[in-house]
């Protein structure tokens, strides 16, 4: 990676333009704040990875502006324009899409841009953006989103549009607190500098889709702006999930560490039409999944699988897997088993497991709930809201050890 230090130290660009390319004001809200305070203004931006780019990036928009890593303006288009961008490992080349004429060249792997009616590789882009080229493989598209717009995009992705507004408000506070706690972390800030973004737009961090930021989500973010969950004055990373199956667990119970929320009982989760589920998998499939994640050694032949410890809510904390040849037993956490099989496949660790009657070479999981089971339960929150509870009461129910505060 030494080449990047040399290249970026002497960034130059060739401003060969079609139409209007030249001096223009740098658009606001483009830089992630390097030192994140306990609360962000609604206009400060966060960086969210939206996915990979094509080998040749198609860029369309009105009033499009592109800048190099030093903030120098490469393109400042008037009206609707369309460009084709490519990265060769050293530089970005920008061409007019219709004519193929060279517009600009920028040394370095990063470009930033803004505009209206944006489409990048045919995908709508509602915020400013960053493009990161890669030496090997496809580049990355990063959304640079004003903070409260990010919160609205998260809760719009997490909840059905017709759910009560109070659920959206509770989810907004949880999502905001999770984001702020993460951004305040020194390790997360170091990771952002290394890879170029703070958040994945998936369940790895928080689901995010700007296009799903509908009116109710925007209203919930706006009406709870600045409200967070804290402990001893510090904002807390407030986890949440879809369906707790009847009772939540502390983060330490699920992952072996983390903040102390307190636990909550729920009677509303059975209202989820998919509250109960069943999964059948062969020993071979389970073994291959665990070996792919390097949880089991390659010379292992799975013979049995049994839950050996459970949480107070009944979640499988540890699962013993036994080798058919040696008889040796390995212990796997319930969440690691979910990760290996797929979080949407093995929906929760609130399961029973037995030898499958349909497939003697496999096992049958029968379970309840969806998600890790810590913090706010979305289906339970819906039930509480339908019974007349406000978002603060909902938050107090799921995070009884934390306090609600406003900046």
Image (spheres, helix red, strand yellow):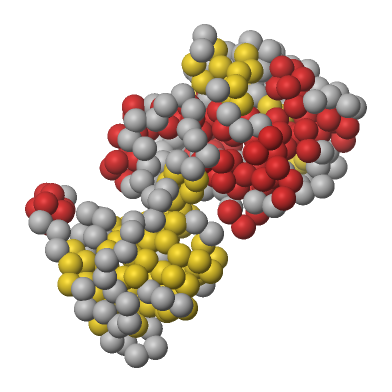
Q: Residue at x 60, y 22 (%)?
A: 406
| Quarter of the rendering containing residue 400 | top right
Position of the C terminus, as image quadrant, is: top right
Residue 10: image location, x then y, percent? 10, 56
278, above or below 118, in the image: above
Q: Position of residue 364 (x, y in %)?
A: 72, 39
For residue 59, what is the image quadrant? bottom left
Asked if residue 333 shows in the view, the reply is no
Q: 311 or 329, which lies in front? A: 311
Is residue 267 visible in the rendered image? The answer is: yes
- Vertically, is 10 above or below 117? above
Of residues 123 and 233, which is closer to you in this image? Answer: 233
Residue found 58% across the figure and 54% down from its top: 210
Identify the residue at image location x=82%, y=47%. Answer: 162
Name the spot of residue 107 as percent of width and height, x first: 18, 64
Left or right: where 215 falls relative to 134: right
Number of on-image labels:
0
Residue extending farthest bottom: 99
Position of residue 385 measured from the top left corner of the image (x, y, whole percent): 83, 30
- Nearest to the observer: residue 121 or residue 306: 121
Tell me where residue 82 sits by quadrant.
bottom left
Q: Residue at x 53, y 39 (%)?
A: 42
Q: Is residue 42 above or below residue 404?
A: below
């Amino acid at each position: 990676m030494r080449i990047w230090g040399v290249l970026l130290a002497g960034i130059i660009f060739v401003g060969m333009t079609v139409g209007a390319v030249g001096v223009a004001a740098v658009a606001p809200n483009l830089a992630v704040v390097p030192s994140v305070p306990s609360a962000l203004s609604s206009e400060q931006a966060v960086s969210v990875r939206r996915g990979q780019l094509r080998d040749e990036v198609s860029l369309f928009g009105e009033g499009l502006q592109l800048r190099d890593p030093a903030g120098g303006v490469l393109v400042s288009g008037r009206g609707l324009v369309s460009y084709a961008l490519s990265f060769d490992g050293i530089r970005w080349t920008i061409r007019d899409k219709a004519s193929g004429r060279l517009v600009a060249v920028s040394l370095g792997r990063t470009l930033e841009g803004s505009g209206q009616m944006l489409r990048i590789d045919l995908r709508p882009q509602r915020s400013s953006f960053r493009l990161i080229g890669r030496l090997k493989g496809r580049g990355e598209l990063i959304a640079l989103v004003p903070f409260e717009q990010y919160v609205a995009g998260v809760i719009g992705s997490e909840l059905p549009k017709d759910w009560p507004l109070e659920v959206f408000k509770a989810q907004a506070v949880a999502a905001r607190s999770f984001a702020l706690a993460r951004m305040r972390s020194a390790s997360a800030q170091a990771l952002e500098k290394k890879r170029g973004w703070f958040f994945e737009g998936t369940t790895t961090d928080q689901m995010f889709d700007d296009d799903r930021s509908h009116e109710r989500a925007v209203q919930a973010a706006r009406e709870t702006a600045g409200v967070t969950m804290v402990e001893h004055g510090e904002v807390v990373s407030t986890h949440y999930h879809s369906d707790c199956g009847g009772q939540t667990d502390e983060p330490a119970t699920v992952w072996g560490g983390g903040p102390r929320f307190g636990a909550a009982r729920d009677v509303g989760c059975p209202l989820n039409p998919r509250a109960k589920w069943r999964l059948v998998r062969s020993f071979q499939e389970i073994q291959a999944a665990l070996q792919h994640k390097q949880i089991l050694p390659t010379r292992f032949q799975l013979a049995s699988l049994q839950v050996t410890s459970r949480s107070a809510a009944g979640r499988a904390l540890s699962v013993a897997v036994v080798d058919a040849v040696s008889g040796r037993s390995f212990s796997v956490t319930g969440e690691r088993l979910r990760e290996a099989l797929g979080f949407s496949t093995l929906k929760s660790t609130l399961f029973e497991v037995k030898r499958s009657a349909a497939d003697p070479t496999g096992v049958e999981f029968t379970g309840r709930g969806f998600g890790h089971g810590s913090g706010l339960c979305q289906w339970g929150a819906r039930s509480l809201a339908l019974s007349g509870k406000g978002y603060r009461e909902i938050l107090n129910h799921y995070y009884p050890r934390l306090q609600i505060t406003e900046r």
